[in-house]
Image (cartoon, coloured by chain):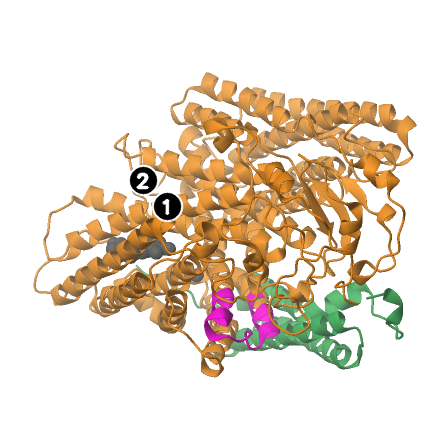
Amino acid sequence: MTTTDTARARPGAVAITLAVFGGTIAWAFRFGLGYLLVPAACEIGDWLLHLVTLGTALLALAALVLSLRWARRLDDAPLRFSMWFGVALNVFFLAAILLEGSGVLFVDACAKAALP
Amino acid sequence: MSAADAPVQQVDLDVLERTWGPRRPGIVGWLGQCNHKAVGLRFIVTAMAFFLIAGAMALVMRTQLAAPENDLVSPEVFNQLFTMHGTLMMFFFAVPILEGLAIYFLPLQLGARDMPMPRFGAFGYWVYLAGGILLLSSFFFGAAPDGGWYAYPPLTTAAFSPGLNIDLWLLGVTLTEISAIVAAVEIIVLIFRSRAPGMTLARMPLFGWSMLATSAMILVAFPPLVVTSLLLEIERKLGTPFFDGTAGGDPLLWQHLFWWFGHPEVYIQLLPALGILATVIPVATRRRLPMRWLVVASFLAIAIVSFGLWVHHMFTTGIPHLALQFFSSASFMIAIPSGVIVLSFIAAFWTGRANFDPPTLFAIGFLVIFVFGGITGVMVGTVSFNFQAHDTYFVVGHFHSVLIGGNVFPVFAGLYHWFPKVTGRHVNRRAGQASFWLMLVGFMLTFVPQHVVGFLGMVRRMWTYEEGLGWEVWNLASSLGSGILGLGVGVSVVAFAVAWRGGEPAGGDPWGAPTLEWSTASPVPQHNFPVIPVVASAEPRWGPLNRPDPVEASPWYAALGNPPEGQRETPVTTPIHGRSAAVALLPTHSLWPLWTTVAIMVVLIGVLFDLWWLAGVGVVLVTASLVAWTWPAGRTDLREADIRETEPTPLDGPDRGRNVRTFRVVTDGGRSIGWWGTVNGVIALGHLVGATAVATVYLRSRTVTWPPTATEPPGVTAIVIAAGLALVAAVSTSLAERGTRSGRAARPVAALLLVLAGAFALAGGLIHLIVTLRGNLPVDEHAFWAIWWLIGATSFVLLVSATITAWVTAWHLGKRDVIRTGHDAELAPVRLWVWSCAVSVVALLAVAMGSAVWWG
Ligand code: HEM
Ligand SMILES: [Cu+2]
């Protein structure tokens, strides 16, 4: 396979990484921030955690849209493969963000207990 | 695009066999083998031995629990039994056996001649063996570890567990962790640089994908356990209160760091097993695996999400409920990719034509047991349920389902599948089937009742129980079942032993399998393949486009001609597309990995028995054997002349547009192998340092009095200067690297710069040593001082390692046969390593000082 047969412009390495792993990265942020900010949310309110969920969900959504578009358009086979791959990962991590984030609606941020 | 009409290489098989065979006769030759088949088989056999030992312990425990108020063993012995059983199974069987299978079969599946760093691989095995010996030796001291497989402090601190037992546990486990990191580094480099020409990443067998995900996980998960084990060992030896809540420490720090490792660990045991099944099931069902790319994505998703689950082992430790809820949801989410993989396997059985050979049966056993364990997993992943079931036999039943279903059954499937490849002989089919049924029935009878008795209130790690609680029948059933399960394992072991010499001969490919390991003879010849195969699809031995026996050499490699006798050459390909890029020379026989391990043992024995002079001798021995190991002797490239004489010819196939002259022969240190190995080593180092930093920040956030007094730590100015020296050392390695790029004349200059770099690093290290030793820090009074001391000691070790690397490389630079003009990359590894050490030292210092002023 030669490199000259890709007529259309290829996205760069950073763009590819973001499209494939954007949802993954967003999830990691939601997870880490969510865990660390629970005590703060107990003091100032749940909206803090909702904000984190919303922001990271939008990020994951953007990565999903991007990977979906490129998966349909690009004519380089290995790259298309990576993009479908990215679509699967982005869908999954978007769902993870929404499921984990929805916990804030049901659980009190100040509740704490340990077994005696 | 086909390479079919390329010139077929004339190979002299005898020369190849001699080149790749053992280099010395007798026991020395045997010990010094570094070939992937020797190392892989050693891993497999040793891990199976540990499996049998740990299994025997389980049977003793089950006998004790068969009847109420039994006194076959004392409570003390029972504690030792479950600890040793759990530890041997988790650390010395489940992970190492998969590493062994990967080291043996992955190079074959990828079409490589050997692992890319054979001596490093041999070292990995010796360290693993040493760890096992250390752990088992505890029986001779009458001090078997008894703190459970996760060794929670404060139980495991010196106050509550005096004696050697926990020390042996900590050091033994640390050694296998190191072995796993070594194997992971090697496997990653193998996957990215040693695939056969034409094998793009997308065409890589699924076992390769699973090992890639697993190895990446090991690099992230294992260093923190090494850190936390060392912290506990230091606490036991020096009284540093890292885990002591009354002196600025926190026992929960251990739980966080342990489970950051521990949860991914169970997926590290699962993913390669799924990869084995993805190898076995297409053969069993005569079809390619459905949804292949979704399976690969699921491997990655599992690998990533598994790092978001660790707190589900700590639901009952008083962490805010909402935070627990996040971990609970993540635990549910991981069921999705696991479900995708299971569905793909089921779809293969549904639409294929399944046989009932032993590997198939064990694959089906996986589906049954793993789905069962997955369902109970979702149950214990639910916070409210977990509060009820925590530490009961329900949990014991659950984790044995996922471990035996998700690890033992797939491993047995793999052993039955690959046995003919290793020995050239078939295992008796009926014996395999009998073993399977015994193991399946035995499993069900052992572990299903445990769920019930858990609901009835029986907690885990119980030595015995009273009559009349309604537990008798369940426990009796469980004990009987474990006997049947043990019998099933025994049948397999006997069948393997008998077949090793006496089994019916199997041809090169008894199964009609799609992957490359079946393209060569069984048992596999020393050189693996007569010629390096060319790959055109994900199932290289199936389908019209592919050759059933891809024996055509890659054209450029064919044009190079046969390697000279005694030269172990392996092609190096590009990471993504698998295009031919270079030829690497692999080292042969070496005893230095073994001596290095022996020297490490000398250090550890010195530490264990407080013989500090012996530990010091050991450190010198370790350094000496590392230098001897990397000594640049006998790595001459015999081939250079050949290459120069080859006429440049335009080539077809995967290498079209290139010519022979553009392929260079790379010895050690080139960007292909050494650089990739170093990058992975740096990733592991980053996680070691990161875990130390996290520990500091965590303790800071949990402690009000940090630092305990207003006095400034001693020698701050000197330490800052030391960090500066480290950076200067790093800069001079960069200059040295740039120097070699501009050709021969610069080589002495580069060597000088490296000598200087080493000197700067050593000076920095010595400053740390002096400040740490002379500061008289009250390390046993407060965790802040303990951390401060720790960071000084770590910086010293890092900087000494930078010194040795720089100086050994400077010595190498003097050797004309290793470094050749025009190669820009030889110094890249040393530059990378010295920079990483320097940056780590600066970062640790910043974290320690930052923690002192933060909220201060
Ligand atoms: C061969 C069949 C096996 C049997 C009959 C068995 C039996 C047992 C028993 C009786 C215990 C003690 C439970 C307690 O008192 O709390 C135990 C604990 C344990 N087992 Fe197994 N086991 C088997 C296989 C395995 C395998 C294959 C693994 C891992 C790969 C494993 C990992 C563990 C672990 C981690 C523990 C917990 C140890 C602790 O509490 O610290 N077991 N097993
Ligand atoms: Cu877990």
Query: What residue do we see at 48% from left, 36% from top?
Result: B127
Horizontal and vertical percent for residue B655? 81, 58
Q: Quadrant of ligand 2?
A: bottom left
Query: What residue do we see at 72% from left, 42% from top?
Result: B584
Mark 1 vs mark 2, CA separation in Å:
9 Å
Check whether the beta carbons of the residues at disc 1 and disc 2 lie within 8 A of each other.
Answer: yes
**Is disc 1 in the same subunit as disc 2?**
yes
- What residue would you read off at disc 1? B151
The amino acid at mark 2 is: Pro
Range covered by the magenta-colored residues: B277-299
Horizontal and vertical percent for residue B634? 69, 27
Q: Nearer the viewer, residue B17 or B795?
A: B17
> Which chain is tinted orange?
B
Q: Chain ID for label 1? A: B
- What residue would you read off at disc 2? B145
The amino acid at mark 1 is: Ala
How many C-alpha atoms fall within 10 Å of the one at disc 2: few (<14), some, or many (≥20)?
many
